[in-house]
Image (cartoon, grey):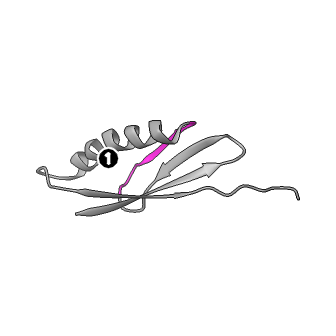
Amino acid sequence: MEYVVNFTWDNEADVWIATSDDIPGLVLESGSFDALLERTRFAVPELLSLNASEPQPLSLTFISKRQERMVL
C-alpha cells in the first residue's frame, strides 16, 4: 500500500511539520528536515500497526513544500 506524507515548513515556528491524510494520527514536527524524515519513517509503521490486524508491505511518498517571502 502507498501512503503520502506531506512536509510543510512553518515560517513562524521555524519547523517542518509532517502530516498525512492517509495515516490517522500522524502529526510530527522538527527544525531539521532530515530529522523529521527519520522520525516519520519510525512513526508511520507504528501508527499503521495500531489500526491493522497484521503487518503489510508499505511504500511512503514524501512531498515537501516551503514558501519564503523575500524583499526585492
Q: Where is residue 24 drawn, in percent x and y?
A: 37, 54
Quadrant where the image shows the N terminus:
bottom left
**Residue appearing at x 72%, y 44% in the figure:** 12
The stretch of residues the image draws in magenta is: 23-31
Q: Where is residue 4 drawn, in percent x and y?
A: 38, 61
**Residue appearing at x 56%, y 45% in the figure:** 16
Q: In this rendering, would 33 be left or right of 60? A: right
Amino acid carrying label 1: it is Val
Compared with 34, 66 (above or below) is below
Quadrant where the image shows the C terminus:
bottom right
Using the image as rendered, state which of residue 54 and residue 6 is in the foreground: 6
**Residue appearing at x 56%, y 53% in the figure:** 8
Q: In this rendering, would 29 be left or right of 15? A: left
Q: Where is residue 42 drawn, in percent x and y?
A: 31, 39
Q: Secondary structure beneath disc 1?
A: helix
Using the image as rendered, state which of residue 50 and residue 10 is in the foreground: 10
Using the image as rendered, state which of residue 69 and residue 52 is in the foreground: 69
Label 1 belongs to which residue?
A: 44
Q: Where is residue 19 drawn, in percent x and y?
A: 47, 53
